[in-house]
Amino acid sequence: MFSRLNQITIFKIGLFLILSELFCVSYVFSDTDQNVSGNPVRIDSSPMEQGGLSIEYSGKPVGLLNHDIISASIVDLNGDGLYEIVYLLPSGVYVAPYKQAAKPFFYRFSGFGTPVSFSVSPDTGWVAVNILIHDVGLESCLLRFDGNTLRLVQDNINMWLNFLNDGTLIAQRFDVRNRFGNVFFIVKPDDNGMVFINEKAIIPMDAVMNLFAFVDLNHNDIKETIFLDRSGMLKVYESNKLIWSKKVITINDPASFLNIKIAVVDSPKTNNKSFWLATNESQQQPSDKISLFKLFSNGDSYAIEPVSIKMNGKISGFSVLNGKMILIVTERSEDASVSGITKIYEIEEPHI
């Protein structure tokens, strides 16, 4: 009898923990201040480019997640014309409608690895998640969302995976010492898993897969290869030739690359494209400033427009939708035993 009661008790405890976790990842969205409170966001233009002037931008929190998330993105994932928020937790990856209160679709992880990053292919439903086994390798996985389910297509992939802005899937070999190896592959996802299109991709060896994009910034009908290298240098290649570079941040730890977010912006106002980086001033811990770097073509060359945002927390996601910057910031509690809160901010940026 005691054994039977003990089994029932253990089952109830396990069920409670599962339901509690699902409850914790529920979230609130609001276009008003009724459900989500917060002050307007202050953005300081950089002394390096703008003379140190302070500018008040129109921005406020519009949603929150009751959790300390690893990473998040807002995107039309399955091409139905509606935006979803995709977010990564230690327990799994979750997909929910943006600005709607609804239970998320989710895929729960198993095994001993730690999820560290993810990427998506807009409109197609593909999600790639990188799961790190420290000092050993990766157990990355490929998932697909069809609007009703989020299902596993392939797992136990010992390579870094990243969908680029144009939907290209890049696989980068793992390196035990530096984490990111020097060999890249272009692969195609299908319902049976990854298909290797060619043996090796022609990508600069110092590139890191999650800070990489193909985009035509200078309107010459040739897509530039843009990436942050392993020293913190932002580089632009065209036709496999380096044409521009500039040091933007200092990288001390390869793991820091996973905390930097990028976005490619197609401006509805100016019809110009730009490449953005978002990062905390300190790569090792949350700080009270988030730095944004906007790379754009100024005609004959390229320029960077940096700004800093006074927010106390870790940058967990960065997107630009319909002329608004979407910043997803995880605010850490001073009490290590208390989970953080993640807030979603919409910020009007007049030059986008």
Image: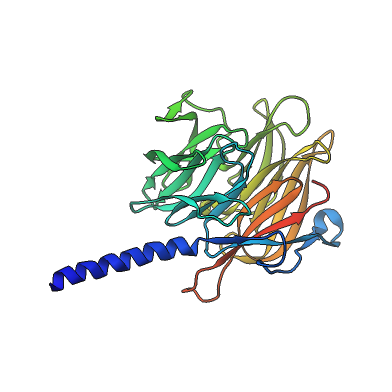
Closest to the observer: 241 or 133?
Answer: 133
Res. 228 in view: yes
Residue 117 appears left or right of 37: left
Q: Residue at x 56, y 27 (%)?
A: 202
* Quadrant of the image occupied by residue 38: bottom right
* Quadrant of the image occupied by residue 301: top right
Q: How far from the left and from the top, in percent, is residue 15?
A: 34, 63
Up-down relation of residue 34 to residue 119 (above or below): below
Q: How far from the left and from the top, in percent, is residue 9?
A: 25, 70
Q: Residue at x 44, y 57 (%)?
A: 90
Q: Residue furthest left?
A: 1
* Quadrant of the image occupied by residue 59: bottom right
Closest to the observer: 252 or 85?
Answer: 85
Up-down relation of residue 167 to residue 56 (above or below): above
Closest to the observer: 328 or 313?
Answer: 328
Up-down relation of residue 149 to residue 31 (above or below): above
Q: Residue at x 76, y 53 (%)?
A: 306
Q: How far from the left and from the top, in percent, is residue 249?
A: 66, 53
Q: Residue at x 83, y 53 (%)?
A: 49
Q: Quadrant of the N terminus?
A: bottom left
Count of labels in the image? 0
Q: How far from the left and from the top, in percent, is residue 120?
A: 55, 41
Up-down relation of residue 247 to residue 91 (above or below): above
